[in-house]
Amino acid sequence: MANAKGRQSAALTAFLIIQTVAAAFFVGDAVGDLIADPTGPHSIYEVFVALALCLGIVFGIVALRRTLVRMRDQEAAIATASGALAQVIDSQFSDWALTPAERDVAFLALKGLDVAEIAGLRGAASGTVRAQLTRIYQKSGVSGRAQFAAFFVEDLLGAALVPT
């Protein structure tokens, strides 16, 4: 997503550069025409086109600035939320008294890895991982992976599943 926003900003910047070059050309041409024929319809038309291009540049700069500020704010919010979620997860794992191995397995399960993937990453047997997941679910008071993940997602949503 950040990459798409970066491309959007780069495209807007390129557009502003092209528009600035065009405006400089039209301003120079309009000034030349005004010197030659200050009241001619062609001269007046070119002045309006040059002014419109200059206004477009100003609005483009404002839009680019707003986009860059919005991107910076969103990136900061995501970083804060990521850090806060990691702290919430770590605190909850401590409350449940998960062992270091159970913490690793639980974290990998929250990331969406299946038993075989977790076993492969940890160099453990699939049966060992299943047993660890069973203990994690018992300690956390949930019946399975979906409820385990939902425990943390519910906090993120901040609202009851069923409106009151």
Image: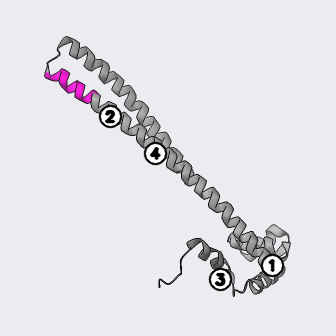
- Give the magenta range: 41-50
Which numbered dot is residue 147? Answer: 3
Q: Mark 2 points at which residue?
A: 55
Pointer 4 with pointer 1, Cβ within 8 A? no
Quadrant of image for the N terminus: bottom right
Residue type, mark 4 in image: Arg
Q: Could you say where residue 28 lies in the image, as x and y percent from the top left? A: 31, 18
Pointer 1 with pointer 2, Cβ within 8 A? no
Q: Marks 3 and 1: which is nearer the front?
A: 3
Q: How far apart are marks 4 and 1 (CA)?
A: 48 Å
Q: Distance between the residues labelled 1 and 2?
A: 63 Å
The mark nearer the N terminus, 4 or 2, is 2
Left or right: 71 in relation to 115: left
Q: Mark 4 points at which residue?
A: 66
Q: Which element is circle 1 on?
A: helix
Q: Could you say where residue 9 lies in the image, as x and y percent from the top left? A: 49, 43
Q: Is the magenta stretch mostly helix, strand or loop?
A: helix
Q: Mark 1 points at which residue?
A: 129
Residue type, mark 1 in image: Val
The mark nearer the N terminus, 3 or 2, is 2
Q: Could you say where residue 67 lies in the image, as x and y percent from the top left? A: 47, 46
Pointer 4 with pointer 3, Cβ within 8 A? no
Q: How far apart are marks 3 and 1 (CA)?
A: 18 Å
Residue type, mark 2 in image: Leu
Q: Which element is circle 4 on?
A: helix
Q: Could you say where residue 135 lies in the image, as x and y percent from the top left? A: 80, 84
The mark nearer the N terminus, 4 or 1, is 4
* Vertical arrangement, residue 119 with respect to residue 75, above or below: below
